[in-house]
Amino acid sequence: MDPTDQFSLFVLRQTELGWECAVNDEYLGMVFNNDSLGQLEPGIEIDGFIKEIREGGLVDLCLQPPNMTSSDLSDQILAELRRGGGSSTS
């Protein structure tokens, strides 16, 4: 698994720490609460990225590329709002 690649995440369940997800139906990982952006719920499929692979095979996930800055994210949000005529369609 290459952290720069985008993966399909299937949200399994919420835990105290965040959201447990299946990564490409092959691995288990966690999107922590501070990385979830409030858009997760069990049973949905969403694109995500590997944030870190820790000792013991634990996989930390995030929903935007790990090297993306908050200004990059702001630019993406503004572009989406412009495309949607001032409202998000996601």
Image: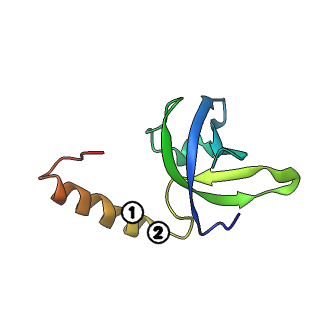
- Position of residue 27 in the picture relative to residue 90 (left or right): right
Most foreground residue, 89 or 67? 89
Q: Residue at x 62, y 44 (%)?
A: 32
On screen, residue 28 versus residue 72, left or right, reads right
User: Which label was assigned to residue 46?
Assistant: none
* Front one among 37 and 6: 6
The type of residue carrying mark 1 is Leu
Q: Which residue is at the far right?
A: 56
Name the colouring of the figure.
rainbow
Viewport quadrant of the C terminus: top left
The secondary structure type at the circle numbered 2 is loop
Q: How many marks?
A: 2
Judging by the rendered image, the residue that carries numbered circle 1 is: 73
**What amino acid does circle 2 point to?**
Thr
Spatial CA distance of label 1 from label 2 is 6 Å
Label 1: how many residues lie within 10 Å, few (<14), some (14-19) or many (20+)? Answer: few
State the image quarter where residue 71 is shown: bottom left
- Quadrant for the N terminus in the image: bottom right
Mark 2, residues whose alpha carbon is within 10 Å: few (<14), some, or many (≥20)? few
x 16%, y 59%: residue: 82
Please give left or right for residue 26 compared with residue 61 in the image: right
Label 1 with label 2: CB-CB less than 8 Å? yes
Q: Which mark is residue 69?
A: 2
Locate residue 20: give its quadrant: top right
Q: Residue at x 43, y 64 (%)?
A: 70
Answer above or below: position of 18 versus 85: above
Q: Which of the two residues, 56 or 7, is positioned nearer the viewer here?
A: 7
Where does residue 60 sit, x and y in percent of width and height?
68, 52
- Report x, y in % for residue 52: 71, 60
What residue appears at the point 54 percent right and 48 percent down from the top-left corner? 35
Residue 53 in the image: state x and y as whole percent: 76, 58
The image shows residue 8, relative to residue 64, as above or below, that is: above
